Image: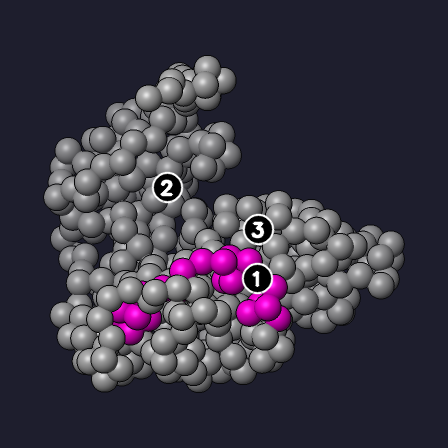
């Protein structure tokens, strides 16, 4: 086989020199404090069994056989999308193969030439990749800084009175676990006639009544242009959906390339989404336990004197900043030796100097496990930082 071009070999070598070289690892044994399976739904036998019942109802087994505009639009899609629209209190839902596909599909298709997109500087890579594919001009605003956002809105509204302006943020940020002030953000959006797009990936199943998300918790559904909910985190399955008006759904079906030109999700994946949402609708115990564990983790941060290195968060994502790729990898290795699966987040995934340990809290983590992992972290910090 042909060798990798030398310029690409040099890029790989630079990653190694920066101690940021990535490799694929098997799911390790130990206490899970690193996966996005916040509610434990990925391991739910009840959800799996109900998925099989749904498939039998439609007499479906394996693949989707094609894109949804060709042969892949099985009846289970209609049921799931109607279910999502009802649960999330919106006119319509359109399922995509992943959150990444949903974001690049939306941002590459909806904002038009001469439109303006203002996005939080910590927005997920899938959003930023979608922005690169957009014909619209895009500019970042400082993280959760609504004063900076409004200053940019004033400038661009004055310069581009005939352009649509989109404001893009996340309800829970994936690397920090924090949230914007959505109420104030939407007041600003209305003031400047801007359209708000909210990614709810890490709020789905976690925030609000029955995990409906931050937007519904704050009763802001009518003020949002589009919401993106993904199912690979708390819902324990795969795929994503864009929520909005019926016209938005029609537009995406006609112009979103990541929807049009891909094989549809398998019926099994869609049935699993439907099954997970049925379970979520009647489930209160898992969300209650998750909230208790999050609060206990935050209390133990204080008890171990670690509050100065943790980013404030009420979500299932608790981030401990330990600057430097090598140092944060050493911290993770020390914790892993004690039987806890915690992963370091390295630059360039996060800005240099803000490398961190990312703790993900779950319903199935015990109080003893939470106490122990923070004691191990505390000992490392005391001896190394």
Count of marks overlaid on the render: 3
The crowd level at tag 2 (other Cα within 10 Å; few <14, some 14-19, many 20+) is many
- Secondary structure of the residue carrying tag 2 is strand
| Earlier sequence position, callout 2 versus callout 1 | 1
Q: Is residue 182 above or below residue 322?
A: below
Query: Residue 42: horizontal and vertical position, in percent?
Result: 22, 62
**Which residue is under mark 3?**
130
- Give the Cα distance between marks 2 and 1: 38 Å
Q: Is residue 4 above or below residue 348?
A: above
Horizontal side, residue 36 vs residue 220: left or right:
left
Horizontal side, residue 347 vs residue 282: left or right:
right
Q: Which mark is residue 256?
A: 1
Horizontal side, residue 32 vs residue 126: left or right:
left
Please report the residue visible at 68 percent of the width from the left and 53 percent of the height from the top: 118
**What stretch of residues is rendered in magenta?**
251-273
Please report the residue visible at 48 percent of the width from the left and 75 percent of the height from the top: 93
- Give the Cα distance between marks 3 and 1: 11 Å
Query: Residue 24: horizontal and vertical position, in percent?
Result: 27, 36
- Secondary structure of the residue carrying tag 3 is helix
- Secondary structure of the residue carrying tag 1 is loop
- Give the Cα distance between marks 3 and 2: 29 Å
Q: Quadrant of the C terminus?
A: top left
Q: Quadrant of the N terminus?
A: top left
**Which residue is under mark 2?**
320
| Earlier sequence position, callout 3 versus callout 1 | 3
């Amino acid at each position: 086989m042909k060798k990798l071009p030398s310029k690409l070999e040099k890029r790989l070598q630079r990653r190694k020199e920066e101690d940021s070289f990535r490799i694929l690892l098997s799911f390790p044994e130990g206490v899970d404090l690193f996966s996005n399976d916040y509610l434990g739904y990925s391991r739910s036998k009840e959800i799996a069994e109900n998925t099989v019942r749904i498939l039998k109802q439609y007499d479906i087994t394996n693949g989707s056989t094609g894109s949804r505009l060709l042969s892949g639009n099985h009846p289970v899609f209609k049921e799931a999308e109607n279910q999502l629209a009802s649960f999330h209190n919106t006119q319509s839902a359109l399922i995509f193969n992943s959150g990444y596909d949903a974001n690049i599909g939306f941002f590459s298709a909806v904002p038009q030439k001469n439109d303006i997109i203002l996005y939080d500087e910590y927005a997920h890579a899938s959003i930023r990749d979608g922005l690169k594919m957009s014909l619209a001009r895009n500019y970042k605003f400082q993280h959760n800084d609504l004063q900076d956002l409004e200053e940019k809105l004033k400038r661009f509204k004055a310069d581009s009175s005939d352009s649509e302006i989109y404001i893009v943020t996340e309800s829970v940020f994936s690397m920090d676990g924090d949230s914007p002030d959505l109420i104030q953000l939407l007041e600003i959006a209305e003031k400047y006639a801007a359209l708000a797009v909210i990614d709810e990936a890490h709020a789905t199943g976690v925030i609000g009544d029955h995990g409906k998300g931050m937007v519904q918790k704050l009763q802001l559904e009518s003020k949002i242009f589009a919401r993106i909910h993904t199912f690979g985190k708390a819902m324990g399955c795969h795929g994503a959906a864009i929520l909005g008006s019926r016209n938005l759904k029609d537009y995406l079906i006609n112009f979103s390339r990541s929807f049009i030109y891909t094989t549809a999700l398998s019926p099994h994946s869609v049935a699993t989404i439907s099954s997970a949402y049925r379970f979520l609708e009647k489930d209160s115990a898992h969300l209650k336990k998750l909230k208790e564990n999050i609060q206990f983790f935050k209390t133990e941060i204080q008890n171990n004197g670690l509050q100065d290195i943790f980013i404030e968060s009420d979500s299932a994502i608790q981030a401990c900043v330990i600057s430097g790729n090598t140092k944060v990898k050493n911290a993770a290795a020390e914790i892993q030796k004690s039987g806890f699966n915690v992963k370091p987040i390295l630059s360039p995934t996060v800005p240099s100097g803000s490398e961190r340990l990312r703790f993900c809290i779950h319903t199935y983590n015990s109080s003893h496990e939470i106490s122990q992992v923070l004691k191990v972290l505390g000992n490392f910090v005391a001896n190394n930082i």
